[in-house]
Image: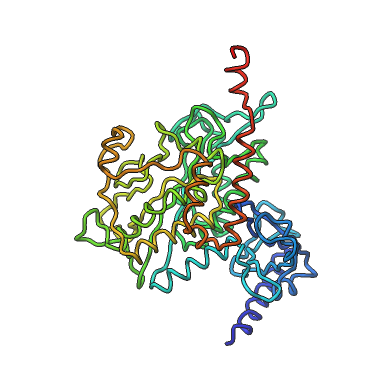
Amino acid sequence: MTEQAKMTSDVAYLLKQMKAQDVRFLRLWFTDILGALKSIAVTAGGFEDVLMDGISFDGSSINGLARADESDLIAVPDTSTFALLPWRPSEQSVARVYADIMSTEGQPHQGDPRWILKNQIERARALGFTFYASAELEFFLLREEGGKYQPIDGAGYFDQDAAALGIEVRREIILTLEQMGIAVGSSHHEGAPGQQEIGLQHMDGLRMADAIQAARYVTREIARRHGLMASFMPRPVANVNGSGMHMGLSLYQDDKNAFYRDDAPLGLSSVARAFVAGILSHARESSAVLNQWVNSYRRLVPGTEAPTYISWAQTNRADMVRVPACREGREQSTRVEVRSPDSGCNPYLVLAVLLASGLDGIERKLEPPAPVTRNVFDMSAAERSEAGVESLPEDLGEAIHRASKGDFLETVLGPETWALFLENKRLEWADYRTHVSDWEIERYLGVL
């Protein structure tokens, strides 16, 4: 069967399915350069044409997709991502598919974050690897009180009774995601008041990025239905832990976990060690993507569980990279956990950058430094220096500086997309530097 014939067959099958489920609206989802989810809604009369040929739109109106002089783009549905939106009525229902962004000549648009990730996944495939990822998605549930948003509870890690509303909201989120075909492993109350965590199970890298986008959308929708706000802001509440998005990463080769070797230290193969080394070697410049907001660096401070140093370990959660201990009989679940990304990131770009970093380590046969065996926060500056432990950027300005000194992110994102991303971040940093906060007014106005 030719590719065109297969496409026609897939579309015909999907049209029958949509008719049987009384789908009246089809939303095409795609993502801008900063991770904001975008949507074009198509009505029933246009389903067949759009599923076959896509739909044109003005790309210059989407952050990072195109300049005004090359604005015509086409959103082409990925029919394999079809899912109903379960919270909408079953009659005259609404469905969604993810869309790939194409040029009018039918070529992948290089500013599409989904294509950027696909490009790195194809690079891994050329090296013989299949890329898998999982995600621990942390967020706050907030309630408006007196014109301000406050956490819905005062609960802490794994609390039950005091977190009853959060438990109910998480239950609805998980059931909705499962109806959409997204597997959830676990959930619990996190350490800060009102803070929740939902763990998305391992799946291939592209599906994981899609799943993160869906999970954030569903979480906000379910929270809204309870009269709450769900926030993925890295640190929306002062003096408590922020919200991370720990990523579990693995490579498979011939259906076997390429990260595992039973006779190696920590059970890590040379492939896994090189992958870790690659992530560590690009950590400083990658921070501009993994932690892309001014507020991201409110989370990355000493004394919390968020990493501030470029180090790796097996058990210590203060390090940027952790290799979770693997139970006997579960060796094929060996993975590398990267703990620095936050929940406000663009998941396509984060996974693309992490995969590119790891593959670079594999291609260059890099060897990581010795894993840290102490709490890196308890080490002196001299001890960290002796162990080869460097610091992550302390703010967005430093992250921009580190990223712009090299060409790694330009290579991964592509020159035009990287230039647009960098321009956006520089504008954000410049705007922040001229802002005078309430903290400064309260602290200085009456005494200086």
Q: Estimate the x, y position of residue 44 in percent, counting from the top left.
A: 78, 67
Furthest residue toward front: 405
Near-viewer residue (254 or 300):
300
Q: Is residue 198 visible?
A: no
Q: Estimate the x, y position of residue 229 in percent, counting from the top left.
A: 64, 37
Furthest residue toward left: 263
Q: Estimate the x, y position of residue 441 in percent, counting from the top left.
A: 62, 20
Q: For the C terminus, which image quadrant?
A: top right
Q: Estimate the x, y position of residue 105 in percent, counting from the top left.
A: 69, 76
Q: Is residue 415 left or right of residue 281?
A: right
The picture quadrant where one finds residue 340 is top left
Q: Residue at x 48, y 30 (%)?
A: 240
Q: Is residue 57 left or right of residue 374?
A: right
Q: Residue at x 63, y 63 (%)?
A: 98
Q: For the N terminus, which image quadrant?
A: bottom right
The picture quadrant where one finds residue 62 is bottom right
Q: Does 323 sit above or below residue 55?
A: above
Q: Residue at x 52, y 47 (%)?
A: 400
